[in-house]
């Protein structure tokens, strides 16, 4: 049976995921940065969190991954962009209609 990752890789991935989760929580709890800076740090931590999960838990390496994996990730990114963008659009529209 083929093993994709070692225990050490999973531990490194887990530690990175915990750190990338704890940083935004600490920033919000302490309010040590401005609101804009906090949102930017949270967004950066979210992107890094996605990359950590892709690398350490889903075992995707873009340097040697098959074309299908890259297409699947690209398709997922497009779907997420559409869902998040559509949700924001609907919420802003509702906000504008309720403000009148």
Image (tube, rainbow, N blue to C red):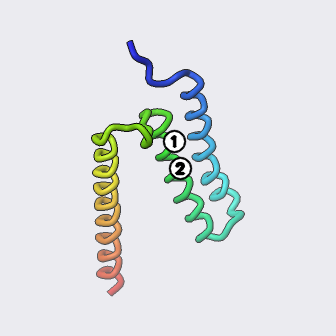
User: Where residue 40 sits: x, y (%)?
Assistant: 56, 64
Q: Residue at x 64, y 51 (%)?
A: 23
Q: Position of residue 5 (x, y in %)?
A: 49, 24
Q: Quadrant of the C terminus?
A: bottom left
Residue in view at x 59 percent, y 24 percent: 8
Disc 2 to disc 1: CB gap under 8 Å: yes
Residue 28 located left or right of residue 1 = right
Query: Cα distance, mark 2 to mark 1?
Result: 6 Å
Query: Which residue is at the far front?
Result: 64
Q: On the rendered image, what quadrant is the N terminus found in? A: top left
Number of dots carrying numbers: 2
Question: Which of the two residues, 26 or 37, is positioned nearer the viewer here?
Answer: 37
Q: Eyeballing the image, is 32 above or below 79?
A: below
- Residue drawn 48% across the image and 38% down it: 55
Q: In the rendered view, does 1 fall on the left or right side of 83?
A: right
- Which residue lies most toward the bottom here? 100
Residue 7, image x, y percentages: 56, 21
Q: Residues within 10 Å of mark 2 (few under 14, many from 20)?
A: some
**Please, what secondary structure does the residue beneath circle 1 have?**
helix
Is 2 rendered above or below residue 47? Answer: above
Residue of label 1: 52
The residue nearer to you, when weighing 62 against 100, is 62
Query: Does residue 34 lie above or below 59 as drawn?
Result: below
| Residue nearer the viewer, 85 or 29 | 85
Disc 2 element: helix
Residue 93 against residue 22 in the figure, above or below: below
Q: From the viewer's perspective, tell me whether residue 79 is left or right of residue 30.
A: left
Q: Which residue is mark 2?
A: 48
């Amino acid at each position: 049976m083929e093993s994709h990752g070692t225990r050490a890789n999973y531990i490194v991935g887990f530690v990175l995921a915990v750190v990338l989760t704890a940083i935004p929580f600490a920033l919000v709890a302490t309010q040590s940065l401005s609101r804009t800076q906090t949102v930017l740090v949270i967004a950066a931590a979210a992107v890094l969190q996605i990359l950590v999960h892709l690398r350490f838990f889903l075992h995707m390496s873009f340097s040697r991954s098959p074309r299908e994996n890259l297409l699947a990730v690209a398709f997922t990114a497009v779907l997420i962009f559409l869902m998040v963008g559509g949700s924001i659009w609907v919420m802003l529209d509702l906000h504008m209609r309720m403000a009148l």
